Amino acid sequence: MKPSPRRKARELAVQAVYSWQVSKNPVNDIEVNFIADNSKRRFDIEYFQLLLRGVTTNIGSIDEAIIPYVDRPLDDIDQVEKAILRVAVFELKDCTDVPYRVVINEAIELAKSFAADDSHKFVNGVLDKTVKLIRPQE
């Protein structure tokens, strides 16, 4: 089954956030390049932009939500894992129309695809704790 346009948007957003973290290039340049480079792919461009801009604009509050639930300084977390966590936490905080289980599952799948072998367990553990703070009503 082909991934949905929204799943592709999440995937590209994680890659773009990773690129932003590593390169420190302006987010607008990264956004334009990712959209141009993936123009033939069917993905939800608006959702990609929402995630990328949301993470980069709200990085402080996103990181504050992550820090209590990791066992090491944020700078020591693998860049791919950090990008996945940041996108997922933004989605949990600001995309309340998306059920938290979907957000966590998507993050786990992204970790399985892009991160180290057991990264999905780390991502799941952090998000499982974070969601209780961000969305206690669910």
Image (spheres, grey):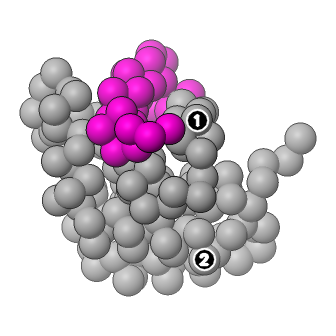
Q: Nearer the viewer, residue 101 or 43?
A: 101
Task: Say what secondary structure mark 1 lies in.
Answer: helix
Distance between the alpha carbons at the discs numbered 2 and 1: 22 Å
Q: Answer with the quarter of the image where residue 135 lies.
A: top left
Q: Which region of the structure is painted magenta?
A: 110-138
Q: Nearer the viewer, residue 136 or 89?
A: 136
Residue drawn 10% across and 33% down? Answer: 73
Instruction: State whether residue 98 is above or below residue 43.
Output: above
Residue drawn 60% across and 52% down? Answer: 98
Looking at the image, can residue 107 be seen? no
Image quarter of the N terminus: top right
**In this rendering, would 91 be left or right of 61?**
right
Residue drawn 16% across and 47% down? Answer: 64
The residue under label 1 is which amino acid type?
Answer: Arg
Instruction: State whether residue 107 is above or below residue 118.
Output: below
Residue corresponding to mark 2: 46
Name of the residue lying farthest toward the left: 73
Residue corresponding to mark 1: 101
Name of the residue lying farthest toward the front: 137
Can you give x and y, in whole percent of width and height, for residue 57 in the image? 28, 72
Q: Residues within 10 Å of mark 1 (few under 14, many from 20)?
A: some
Residue drawn 54% across and 31% down? Answer: 108
